[in-house]
Image (cartoon, rainbow, N blue to C red):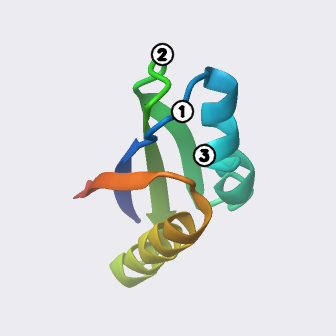
Amino acid sequence: MHISILTMAFSLPGCGSLKEKRQRMGGLHEKFGRNPAVAVCESGEHNRHDASEWSFVVVGASRREVESLCSQIEDKIQHSVQGRIINITCERI
């Protein structure tokens, strides 16, 4: 069993409310939470309008499978989130 925690921090310039923040983040729970190998949560910057941090716990039978899932998550987020990614970390457990 292989596990990685992918954490992504976002800047949301001009975002004026928590409602707008949810809209700009594009429903990350719905997009990635359906996959049984991925758990997703907003892990930081809960009360800030102009920033957000999300963590994805990815589990797989092989390291290659986990790395592939992490790459897919990064790619999809870069094309769907209306914000700027300011930091990405991936921790293997």
Q: Quadrant of the C terminus?
A: bottom left
Q: Nearer the viewer, residue 68 or 3?
A: 68
* Residue drawn at (43%, 44%) of the image: 55
Disc 3 designates what residue?
Answer: 25
Secondary structure type for disc 2: loop
* Residue drawn at (48%, 61%) of the image: 59
- The tag earlier along the polypeptide, 3 or 1, is 1
- Amino acid type, mark 2: Asn
Lateral position of residue 32 relative to residue 93, left or right: right
* Residue drawn at (44%, 31%) of the image: 50
Nearest-to-viewer mark from 3 and 1: 1
Residue 61 appears at what percent x and percent y?
47, 74
- Amino acid type, mark 3: Met
Lateral position of residue 90 relative to residue 78, left or right: left
Disc 1 designates what residue?
Answer: 15
Q: Nearer the viewer, residue 67 or 12?
A: 12
The answer to whether one can see residue 21 in this image is yes
- The tag earlier along the polypeptide, 1 or 2, is 1
* Residue drawn at (70%, 47%) of the image: 27
- Compared with residue 6, is residue 72 higher up or lower down, i.e. above or below? below
- Compared with residue 27, is residue 73 higher up or lower down, i.e. above or below? below
